[in-house]
Amino acid sequence: MTLVAYFRSLTEGIFRRSRIEHDLEEELRSHVEHRADHLASSGLDRAEAERRARAEFGAQLRYKEECREELRGNFFETLGQDIRYSARVLRKAPGFTVVAVLTLAFAIGANAVVFGVLNGLILRPLNVPQAQSLYEIDWGAEKSGWHSYPDYLDLRDRNRSFESLAAFSISNVAMDTGSNPSSNWVYQTSGNYFDALDLQPYLGRFFHAADERGPNSAPYIVLSYSFWQSRFQSDRSVVGRIVSLNKHPFTILGIAPQDFHGTVLFFVPDFYVPMVNQEQIDGDTTLNIRSTRWIIGIVGHLKPHITPEQATSDLGSVGAYLEKNYPKEDGQMRFSLSRPSLVGDFLGRPVRAFVAGLMLLAGLILLAACANLGSLFAARAADRSREIALRLSLGSSRSRILRSLFTEAGLISLAGGALGTWGSFLLLNRLTVWQPFPRFPISMPIKPDASVMLVAFLLAVISGILFGLVPVRQLLRVDPYQVVKAGSAAGPGRRITARDLLLVVQIAICAVLVTSSMVAIRGLARSLHSSFGFDPSQAVLADANAKMAGYVGDAALLMQKRMIAALESIPGVKSVGLVDTPPLTMGGTTTLIFNENNADPRPSNAATQAFMYHISPDYFHAAGTSMLAGRSVNWHDDKNAPLVAVVNREFAVKVYGSVETSLGKYFKRRDGKRIQVVGVVEDGKYLSLTEDQKAAMFLSVAQYPMNEAWLVVRSNSDSQQLAAGIQHALRSLDPQLPIFIETWDTALNGALFASRIATIALGVLGVMGAILSITGIFGMAAYSVSKRLKELGIRIALGARRKEVLDAALGRAVKLLAFGSAAGLALGLLATRVLAYIVYQATPRDPLVLTGVVLSMALVGLVATWIPAQRALSLDPLTLLREE
């Protein structure tokens, strides 16, 4: 048969069924007629002969069904019949249909949203050519992505596994185009950055490695496409224009591709500059200092046929070279590879752990929804047992009935999947444009794509199969004769049924979700009322970046003193302090600390690793930090005085054994300089709320001048009025000084962001789980009451008490609720350990958490059984017996 002939026959089989149906009718009619003729010839009346012939022949519908199954090309017609029949059945039960579709829509939508986040932040590669071969180099046990520029040069030149290695960092600079100076976020990159990523400019050209000829030798800019549109209104003549960065002239070379946003997924820079111009951008001269790790990432494409394992081994030889030749600066250099996305493991590890946990909990939501719908389908199959028995008696096959039930499940799952996918796309699109931190160019790269739609479709199909399978065994065991004879299904027995198991699973999942959400809420509450080592209330932060106005070194220090004096004169201001980086806001710098007598400053010989801050004399008062012993720094602790430091309690205990023995003692940094401890302050949180207690030291800004610093202003005045006063005072010193002002409480939003997102996400999942459990328990309780109305009426007529009636009607549901809640609580205590990565002080062993879960599950049971209980108690025995 040719292909054309095959399709012609298939088309005839699908679209010309009337002729086939007519032939079937004629064939069956001829058999009945022949038997009737034979009976009539033996002397029977014709009418009686035809009646007996039809009775002997049996169910004609079954024979017609079997004949249709044998015919080729019948699949689409049968499917159409099943769809039409299932649609009619669902339309006759609108309440069940709406509840089922919405239940599945919420569950699939939740999974699609979480997968969209997982796909955008972790699974989806960077938008660069050949992203599958792009890797980032990390080092150390903590897999840090921070590197020094000299180490980058050695990695770039000595490895044999990468096509090329490019480095990048992130900075804040002031751009002046002649009017309206602005503060902008930029990538400082190696000269080969764009070439290593194999990118082509949208307009103009990129800078290259050949443009670099030493420090401050490449004053060039490449604008991002979005910044070119917003700042320069897509003006193509901007290429070649000279603009000012921190009052240094830079030439715009070109525009980056439209869909390229850098090599950190969530951070979108305004433009790119060569990092050899670090001094002009940052005001620092640490470009060639090997011990200063200010590069946040090194990326590159592996050469063809080079595996990540081979590249790691190759980098090991580079690390051995660095350890041998620079033992003081590099120590143990163990390199590893990761996919560039979330700045190494600092953000990547907790984000991956939390998203994986969310994915697991969202999967439990879907499983609970399937259990809920499976229970409802089983109950509907029991209610429709008489209908199914009649269909079997009339000749319908069990396979056809099963197919119709699966078609109903498929229609519900596809409708729920479509609705859930639509809702997830709306939410993901909103998250894409969400700006949680207005000061930073944050972009959530979680725009939904075909993969999200495919996952939602697969979840819908799998869900339909799962809850459609539940009533299969129940249907296969139906005895049409017994069902028709009995007239109705019997009440529930004492044995454990599939519906009971499904309900227990559903309640256990709900308890897991409720436990997780309670832990997150409790952890967030603790984080809001814990000790940070400073008091953010009534404190305002002002970022008056001196380097952006052209002040560096001693000039910056002089300007910062003038700023402090100007702000102290504002009415209502109690104290003003200066700090290079406020704790819990923008990360922190760490350094190795060595004992005074140590002569070999290798990392392995370090006494501890401490956070390092540079402060002005009145910083601790302005920050609300308690002084435990000694004194703070003062303006006399300048470059002409011995080096001094204030340390926290953890530092004093780790290095000297106690607070009391630390005062007056000395320690060394890696450069060998001796620093004396003159004071001890309370411990605090410096990088994140979830960190273990860390050592910290505070150095005098007069001994280590900083070009970038924040002013901490403590006052009883209204924050808005204080901000206006700060703005006016600083502008009066220098109108070109860029200023950013916010309360310290607002600045902590970044540190609390993960905890709040975790609490919101887990809270939503917990509410969804509770709703599913309520509907599941309500469905079982209502079904139990409706099937035992006669029994309950008799009990009431015989004088049963209300408690006995409720126990008979709802006792089974209550027992299942208690068992499922206990199992879910135990599982929840184990599942919530993943929250320790995100939520500060999150512990499932908190008595308030345990009490909250128990009360929540009791409330779920009360709400779910309230209406069935009222129905059971309000039964009228006389009315029931009269109806019977």
Image (cartoon, rainbow, N blue to C red):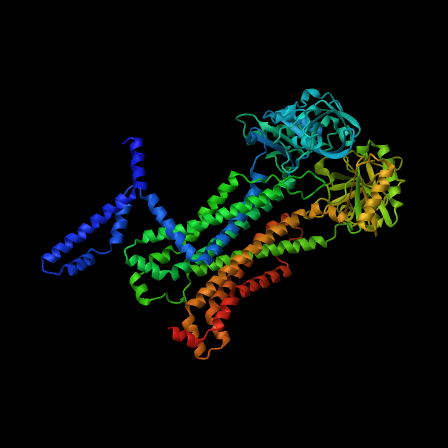
**In the image: residue 33, left or right of residue 390:** left
Q: Residue at x 51, y 63 (%)?
A: 817
Q: Position of residue 264 (x, y in %)?
A: 64, 35
Q: Nearer the viewer, residue 227 or 366?
A: 227
Write down the quadrant of residue 470 in the picture.
bottom left
Split into 4 quadrants, where in the image is the C terminus?
bottom left
Q: Is residue 240 in view?
A: yes
Q: Position of residue 170 (x, y in %)?
A: 70, 34
Q: Position of residue 843 (x, y in %)?
A: 63, 55
**In the image: residue 516, left or right of residue 276:** left
Q: Is residue 665 in view?
A: no
Farthest left residue in view: 42
Q: Nearer the viewer, residue 88 or 134?
A: 88
Q: Position of residue 706 (x, y in %)?
A: 81, 36
Write down the quadrant of residue 302 in the picture.
top right
Write down the quadrant of residue 494 in the picture.
bottom left
Q: How many marks?
A: 0
Q: Nearer the viewer, residue 714 or 448?
A: 448
